[in-house]
Image: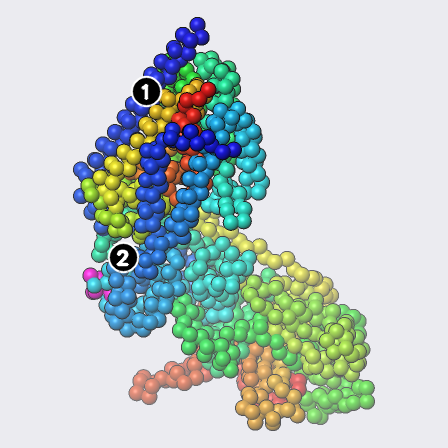
Amino acid sequence: MLTAGAFEERRTNEGRLTGLRVLFAACFSILVVAFWVIQVLQHDKYANQAENNHLRTIPLRAPRGVVFDRNGQVLVENRLSFTIAIVRDQARDLNGTIERLAAATGRDPAEMAAIVKNRQNEPKFRPVPVIEHATLAQVAAVAARQIELPGVLIQQVPTRQYSAGVAAHAFGYVGEVQPVQLETTEFQALEPGAIVGQAGLERVYNRHLMGVDGNRFVIINSVGREIEELQKQLPVDGQRLQVTIDADVQRALEDGFKAAGFAGAAAVLDPNTGEMLAMTSLPAYDPNAFASGLPGQAWTRLLTDPLKPMTNRLIQGTYSPGSVFKIVMAVAGLEEGVITPDTKFFCSGHGVFYGRAFKCHKAGGHGWVDLRHALEKSCNVYFYNIGDRMKIDTIHSYSARLGLTGKTGIDLPSEVDSLVPSTEWKQRTQKQPWYPGETISVAIGQGAVSVTPIALATMIATVANGGTLITPHLGKAFDAADGKGWQPIPTPEPKSRLSMTPEMLQAVRDGLWMVVNEAGTGGRARIPGRDVAGKTGTSQVVGLQNKSLATARGMDTRDNGWFVFFAPRDNPQIAGVVFAEHGEHGSSAAPIAKHVMETFFAKKDGLPLPVIQMPGVAAPPAAAPAPTASPVASGNGRTPPPARASVVTARPGG
Amino acid sequence: MIVDRRLLPHLDWPLILGLLALTLVGLSTIYSVTIDPVTKVAGQEFWTQLYAIPIAFAALAACLLVDYRTLVQRSWLIYLALIALLVAVMFFGVVRGGARRWLQFPGLSLQPSEFARITVALVLTMFFADWRRSAKNIPELAIGAAIVAVPFLLIAQQPDLGTATLLAPVYLGVTFMAGLRLRWVWTALIVLVLLSPVIYRYGLQDYQRDRIATFVDPSKDPRGEGYQQLQAKITVGSGGLYGKGFLQGTQGQNGFLPVAHNDFVFSVLAEEHGFMGVLGVMALYLFVITRSLDAAKLARDRSGALLVVAIVSGFGFQVLYNITMSAGLAPVKGLPLPLMSYGGSSLVATLAGFGLILNVRMRRFGN
């Protein structure tokens, strides 16, 4: 049995082994036939494809989100620009192609070769952009020589387009993501070469504004012509952003500065919400220049310009606030019970504190003044007296509640801290105790007080709204085009509330109203019927003893001027700050504020917007009779206010 | 343990020469794909492969030293070692290309899953031949399947479904030789065909369905696997009858065909040496397979025959699949072509398997 079984098994095995052989032989035979068909019968077809068919990936850059103003007017949009790129696997003779392309476009071949070399580790079918933002002439030159330039590609790329001369520092600019930035959490997961916001709103809201790039996968032939599109991934547009800025108010602000000819900064906001209606910082850069690729030289020039156009003075410059600080002293004095609105002090032209005479700007003195008149006339002695009755830390604490310490939290990058001194600060930074005499200087905004313009805007908005510390902000809503419509960006919660008693609030508002509407220094901001309230300030750029030295070195030592304002007095709807760098006096900043407020109210009432007369834009002599508009046209037929710049000349104070 | 000198004349030298010829053809193709067109310097892969070939033949020789029957008897130890290595990969493995498959040692990286086939071949031989279990009843077949399932699941989760799937022909080969009823094979095939729409609908993951859809219509995914499939076909087809010539290929060298030195090495061969080259290499593979099956016929016992068929089935299936894929005729799966593709672990494991086949033939006389 065993032998028979073994024999039986052996026979089965042999049968099955033969079966396996036949199976393998059959499979190989089928494969041979298949290869015969592909390699011999269809050879021509595939040989042709191998010769000509190359896959190319053409990136489709996603347009960044369009930015609208609060009324839906477009502020930042996109235009198409041309990029010339080389596809290495298509350029038969890469060096020759680079040379011919450089010659055709007037570029340096060595520079172009270096760009290509930098990208040599990328797949060869990926286009290497060698000329970005090509001129039409360059595009035409390349298009005409397409046959001699196989592998050279012209691509259309959406590029940022900003309204010229409008709030450059608010929008910021875009540029290629830097290698070091790719390692930060802000820009991780992006590919090298991605265009990101580098400053301003473009940077803060980059994640929303940036879209998702798409691709086209195409087959091209040996001369680079597209034969077939295999697949297309459409780019996803960036989210649309609405900002709180009002384009008309913004333009009025820029025009105001242009007419006055100052450098400086300004913020105009809704005091009740913190929504920024306009902002500027001058001199500024042209964000369009960044969008179309800034040459290295121009970049260096921007960075080394002594006027610092890259600095956003509104949030990055800190200055002595001068007399504007008296508002803080008035609020603090009233709230602490040091004074009442009716408390009077006698000003003889100076006050003696700690054995030292502190001067008022009016040599003969103001005589007996109460709080309202002290604000109106900006009497130093009155505020010395308040300061003398308060501790520096109390002043610091009220400054904090009015937004004058630290950062305001505006949605712009790189804001710097504002400083109002305290005993702790002095101990920490100078290892010295606070001397009470220093408090007297602080009381009129001198000494170590150093604040950003945006902090003063926050302060005046807080006083205007009765004590609610708002956060100035620019972002209003996003639209992701996902069918949900505009999604509002939540308004930041108030950071603190000073509940000022109506009576005391009214005294401060009255004093500030008198600055503009009675004998004060802000008369140039007066608008009949609008009850403008405000306060000027003047601050030295360098101390008097160093002034001649600094002048000799060629520094601009003219004083800085401030004007903070809100209107109408009893129901403020607009507030803000104008900082006139080297404007010499706060009253010179007032006309800018006036033009802004007039525009704001005219727009609100549906009236024609006022026009400001630019200096040097006079009608040519041969033309029709000069327009009848007054130098500072009010637009509503109101008489321009009298200039008051010469009324007060003494400093400090004013 | 010195091999009895009397055994040497029984070594199957023609089979060894066939194996050597295929590894050298593979090496020259790797050279052609990886050579730098400007500096004329061969790529790193060429040198790695050159150094792997002697090691692999040493592994082949090592597999001759011990009588295959001893190896079969002790195969459960090898099996446990394999499982241990695969578990070690799970915890200490190196991740490359999204899969955890390699163990990194100084100067050497090892892919244990490559050794699963030969281990499973040994264990199944032990089960069906040594223990004389029958492949004619379901419970025994199920136990055999369970033996395969453990390494299968460990490899599949790496994830490397391709390598795991190669265990299936090993199992089928052994059970076929062990007397699997052909009726069942036909029945299973028919059921599978009938159920395929249901499996497609409910048994597959989305990405697997995509893969099949891409195979049917490569233009659906012209960037991913569809692209590779199209390019593979262009590569092979452009070779023509006589090929573009050694070092004259363009598809792999210019980067249109990905992993040309590995999964698509046969496509490059077809491009450079044409249909004639394809015929030659396929003939070599068929020779190696039939010559190996001779060893099964000559084997002195049932375990020898089963072991040979197990190894040949796994090898033959992988060769056929890779060649079909390299012409763009099968879905793209990361399976190298045994003996020719770049990859030290694969080469060592393949030649170790042939060592066992030679072992069976060499010891066909004797007690």
- The location of residue A55, given as percent across then percent down, is 30, 50
Q: What element carries label 1?
A: helix
Q: Do labels 1 and 2 share a chain?
A: yes
Instruction: Determine whether, in the image, residue B255 is placed left or right of residue A42.
Output: right
Chain ID, mark 1: A
Note whether residue B127 is visible: yes
Kindly report which numbered mark, 1 or 2, lies closer to the viewer in this rendering. Answer: 1
From the image, tell me which residue sits under label 1. A19
Instruction: Judge whether residue A145 is colored magenta.
Output: yes
Mark number, residue A251: none
Q: What stretch is highlighted in magenta?
A: A142-147
User: Going 42% across and 43% down the picture, which residue do you hit?
Assistant: B54
Instruction: Judge whether residue A620 is colored magenta.
Output: no
User: Going 41% across and 15% down the picture, which residue do you hit?
Assistant: B179
Q: What element carries label 2?
A: loop
Q: Which amino acid does label 2 sit on?
A: Gln
- The location of residue A176, given as percent across then percent down, is 44, 64
From the image, tell me which residue sits under label 2. A90
